[in-house]
Image (spheres, rainbow, N blue to C red):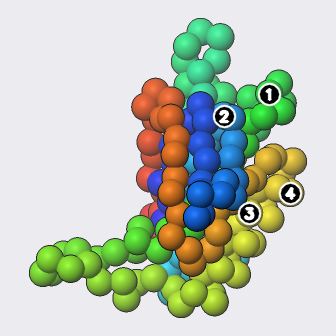
Amino acid sequence: MKTVIQRVTGASVTVNNIVKGSIKSGLLVYLGVAHNDSESDADWLAEKITNLRIFDDDNGTMNLSLKDIAANNPDAGVLAVSQFTLLADARKGRRPSWNGAAPPEKAKTIYLYFIKKIREQGLICETGEFQTEMKVSYTNDGPVTIILDSEQ
């Protein structure tokens, strides 16, 4: 699984001008599922993402995790957006290949499992709408953007 994680001070996802999910602060997570990904990849990413120390402490040092800030800020959470384009292979030609992306049925199952694992940690996890064109709005805080791949 590949993810792009952004620390945000607000994020929302809209489908047909209807807000499907939003958070006031926390992490915007774009999630792409590959053919060989499994629930164990989602387990690892959910644990890693919620415990990454990328929020500032009182000294301005990135020393706090999402779990840490959510303990004092009930509005903090995750906005998880499925994004198969993270699996694009653009090494040849000018049109990316999507062959590395899992079929929609498998991708949706693992995406929903990932969301469940975030929520099991007592965190808010808002979502977009799977396999739909979405509009994502956010304010990147920092900016802080991190890429994680469960295979690496």
Instruction: Name the residue tied to disc 2.
Output: 25
The first of marks 1 and 3 along the sequence is 1
> Which residue does the image show at 75% across and 53% down from the upper left?
125
Residue 115 is labelled as 3
Report the front residue among 133 and 124.
133
Q: Which residue is mark 4?
A: 120
State the image quarter where residue 70 is shown: top right
- Identify the residue at horizontal 53%, vertical 90% (top origin): 103
Give the number of the mark in front: 1 or 4: 1
Q: Position of residue 104 (x, y in %)?
A: 57, 87
Query: Dot 1 surroundings within 10 Å: few (below 14), some, or many (20 or more)?
Result: some
- Nearer to us: label 4 or label 3: 3
Q: CA distance from mark 4 to mark 3?
A: 9 Å
Q: Please state which amino acid type lies under the numbered disc 3.
A: Ile
Q: CA distance from mark 1 to mark 3?
A: 20 Å
In the drawing, does residue 39 fall left or right of residue 36? right
Residue 32 percent across, percent down from the top left:
51, 70
Residue 116 location (% of width, % of height): 80, 65
Do residues under tags 1 and 2 come within 8 Å of each other at their CB atoms?
A: yes
- The amino acid type of the residue labelled 1 equals Asn
Which of marks 4 and 1 precedes in the sequence? 1
Q: For the point 57% across and 78% down, which residue is it?
A: 131
Asked whether residue 80 appears in the rendered view, the answer is no
Q: Give the position of the C terminus as an image quadrant.
A: bottom left
- Dot 1 falls on a residue whose secondary structure is loop
The residue to which callout 1 is attached is 73
